[in-house]
Structure formats: C-alpha cells, structure tokens
Amino acid sequence: MTELAIFMLTASAGFAGGLIRGLVGVLKQMRAGRKFRPRYFLLTLVMSGLIGLIAAMFVENDARFAVLAGYVGGDFIESLYKVRFREKYRPSNRKVRIP
C-alpha cells in the first residue's frame, strides 16, 4: 500500500470510531427525550476523527487503534464540553458552609 492509502485508511478508521461514538450519543439523547443537534454531532465527529488519526499516527498507522482512539476521542470531547458548559451555565449542587 502507498503512504497515502495507509493515511486514508487510518483517517477513515478514526472517523469510524467517532461515528460509532456519535451514534451512541444520539441514541442516548433520543432515549432521554432530548433534541438532536446536528451541528454539535458533526463537530464532535470531525474532532474525534482527527484525534483518532493523530493518535494512530503515533502507533504506526494502525487502523484498529484509530477506531479506538476516535471513539475515546469523541467521548473525551463530549465530557469536556459537558463539564465546561455545566460549570459556566448551571448552578452548582454543592452546598458551601461558611463558618
């Protein structure tokens, strides 16, 4: 295989991992009765695909690793997004006692 073909295979595998994670997230949202946001879905798909590609390049362009890294990358991005915006826009449930 040529270098470009290996690169494309690895990139596709990273995006596949991100797509799997995105679909799991969509199914979870549908079960919870929440609204589907296509812009957010596409953004996380692209970001997790890039994470999968970059991570797989460090492991000799292994497509299996790219799928895993894409999935985990999507999960990481979603968790980071939730933490960041919950912290900014939602009140904390923590009770602070002032002595």
Image: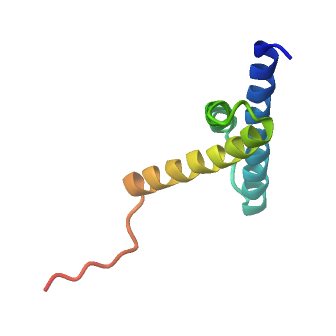
- Looking at the rendered structure, the number of numbered marks drawn on it comes to 0
Q: Using the rendered image of the protein, determine whether residue 36 is visible from the camera's viewpoint.
A: no
Q: Using the rendered image of the protein, determine whether residue 19 is visible from the camera's viewpoint.
A: yes
Residue 85 left/right relative to 60: left
What quarter of the picture does the N terminus occupy? Answer: top right
Residue located at (81% from left, 25% from top): 9
Q: Nearer the viewer, residue 31 or 25?
A: 25
- Residue 78's place in the image compared with 99, above or below, is above
Q: Nearer the viewer, residue 47 or 64?
A: 64
**Residue 15: image location, x then y, percent:** 74, 33
Residue located at (72% from left, 30% from top): 61
Q: Residue furthest left?
A: 99
- Residue 80's place in the image compared with 58, above or below, is below
Residue 45 left/right relative to 2: left
Q: How is the image coloured?
A: rainbow
Q: Residue furthest right?
A: 1
**Residue 31: image location, x then y, percent:** 78, 61
**Residue 99: image location, x then y, percent:** 13, 86
Residue located at (42% from left, 59% from top): 90
**Residue 58: image location, x then y, percent:** 62, 34
Q: Residue furthest bottom?
A: 99
